[in-house]
Amino acid sequence: MDYTITSKQLTFILVGCMLGTGIITLPRVTTEVIDQDAWLAVLFGGIIPFVSLWLSSRIIGKYPGLSFIALTEKLAGKIFGRLLAAVFAIYSILAAAVILRIFLEIITMYLLPKTPMLVKVMLGLGVSAYMASSGIKVLGRLNEFLFYVLLPLIFFVLPALFAYADIHYLMPVLNHSINEYSKAAITTGYAYSGFETLIVFGPYVIKKKETFKASIIALSITASLYLFAVITTMVVFGAGLTQKITWPVLRIQSVVDIPVFERIEFLFILAWIGSSIKPVCNQYFCACLIIKDMFGIRSLGAVVAVLFPIIAFIAWYPKNIYSTFCFSDFVGTYSLILGTAMPLFLLGLSLIRSKGRVKDEGNS
Amino acid sequence: MKVIHRRILLLITAAASVLLLSGCWDQRTLDELGFPFLLGYDYAREEEKEYPDDKYLISVGAPVLYEEAESKYHVERTPGKVPAQTRSRRDAHFGEQYILGQEQVAIFGNEIAERENLNVLMDSLSRNDKIKDSLYMAVAEGRAVDLISTRVKHYPNTGIYIRMLLKNIRKSNFLPVCTLFTFRRDVFSNNTAPMLPCIVQKGEDIVLAGSCFVSDGRKTENIGWMESQTAVFLRGIKAKGEISYDVIEDEKVIDRQTFSGGNRRKVKIKREGDKYIVNIQIILSGVIVEKTKTQPLRELPETLKLTQKSLEDLIKKRSQELVKKVQEEYGFDALNIAKEIKAHSREKFEKEDIDSIIRDAEINVDVKVNIENTGGWV
């Protein structure tokens, strides 16, 4: 299997990792903290991912040609390095499971209310397993293709914007304390979960120098789409109503009647299914790749098959939507810590090693 | 993984999808579905109750889709302790499964709208994501069930008639339209009183009778057609319609004209100490579609100024009267200026604060009329 991707494909893989179900709930979770300033939280929330992407790019740039597992083993030793990789693999498994579950909660609410959760989990994960077993190149192409499927979804909210948008709902600007903005930035940071996968996907980029640029483009695309979703929801619903709606970005489409189509939110969901399954595929692949390298397994498909029941069980386990949201918050926190601590730690180790080497060379 | 393995996995996934999704848990047969158009909320009368603790009567008006059916419209009345309970009770005597996403209009009986909190009453509607936010809302002058049961002349389905009536009033009568979305936005984001159209049965027809405000979830007294139009202007609900008025010069009526056009508003907020000064400018733009006097074209510019002024004075007078009523009688934000006040201030306001500001504010109204032409006849 060819394990190389272009920097453009890396951009779309990262966008695919970050942009999933979070966009549907983001306006609600941010307005709960800072009301009409929610859109600012989207910008502040991008700071942690930006730092993480910069750190990860530095690490990848310093050790070109080394995969994530080889990198951790080289810098932290075989045992500790594998432990670090295992922490990442566990995160990817949990992330794949929770994203799949939130995605299925929306499908349950709008399309398949009576179908048992386990059946939906199996079907969703089956598609993801197929994609994850296809390799990084196919995953890159899929992410790119499905990104263009997502773009026209923007037009679905335009009727509501034209009919009901009111700029007053964004005013007054900067009306909260620094504490509240920090809290909102962390909450929004959860929505960017997926940025940390750069350290796994980055080593496979053909032109290593373009890794950071590609990741920043991915972050900018994600932030722009989040900003669009939050501002659109805010100017139509206002902060008070946004906080009352579980899926505000979906609900916004039912405020106007569209001749012929009438209920466009169902069309939106059909198109959105394709793009929201991407992070599940990407995280699934990420976990498989790490485990495959860690144990020296030759077949990626075998790892995919082994992880299937584990991810399925974790995705099926939450008893209700509220446990799912708690689980999602936990994975979001895990992602922020992992995304910054892992590259920072590896970079630290790398600096210590290079200083040690310089010292050794000086002594000799 | 070999290509053949991937193909097998793909085949299994596709087969499972087809098998599991097309014929199992969520399958529905079109023949077994009912499509409710109208939803009515009333208190249940003694003779309508199935159990002693039944409180509400929820009526549903739905089209009958069987070709051989005698009537093309059916009204289902079901009592219940709470509105959502009627859904399962209805299934006990009505076989078809109602598709709630097809509901078009919710009508509240006058008594229930006055006494119950509409936010609580509509809780089951708000929680259901399948119910669209563009669902129209209205208040009936009597009971909603009587209105829903009315067979309107030439219409096989009263639901279609009422939906069209409510949908188009804003385009022709300067009257308010209220949907589930605008209602909830007024309550939860604006802290303002939603404005609902009132409909009434007159003989074999259902007609618009004005409107009412909903404060703290409960309906206030009805306001007439003219006051409703003025409220639409003051609230800045973009609408279209016609107004007939006298053109007055030196306190004498010199012409009678009909203006046809649209409205918008601008609001400016100033704060002096604890007092808010609210300046509302109503802007009307349109054409004269009727006038009793004909004039040569060269005289029209001068007459137009007089025409505009007469209409401006009329709307201003009506607006000032309504503003006075809002401040002195209602004491809540019926003018939808809370969002501007909130946008202007850095303080956090609850509904009580907004109501207090409205009562004490200095509210000035200015009207500007722009007549674009007087039609194709000089």
Image (spheres, coloured by chain):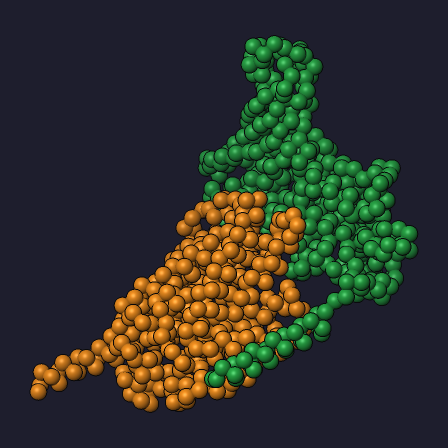
Q: Looking at the figure, which quarter contains the C terminus of chain A?
A: bottom left
Q: Is residue A277 visible?
A: yes
* Position of residue B244 measured from the top left corner of the image (x, y, whole percent): 69, 23
Where B208 falls versus B131 (above or below)? above
* Position of residue A219 measured from the top left corner of the image (x, y, whole percent): 38, 62
Res A201 quadrant in image: bottom left
Res A71 quadrant in image: bottom left
Q: Residue furthest front?
A: B4
Along the horizontal axis of the image, is A355 left or right of B177? left
Res A338 quadrant in image: bottom left
Q: Looking at the figure, which quarter contains the N terminus of chain A?
A: bottom left
Q: Residue at x 56, y 39 (%)?
A: B337
As rendered, which of B77 and A313 lies closer to the eye?
A: A313
Q: Residue at x 17, y 79 (%)?
A: A355
Q: Residue at x 56, y 10 (%)?
A: B298
As rendered, which of A64 and B73 lies closer to the eye?
A: A64
* Position of residue B195 measured from the top left corner of the image (x, y, whole percent): 67, 42
As rendered, which of A299 and A183 lies closer to the eye?
A: A299
Q: Residue at x 58, y 28 (%)?
A: B284
* Position of residue B357 measured from the top left corner of the image (x, y, whole percent): 55, 40
Rendered colour, chain B: green
Rendered colour, chain A: orange
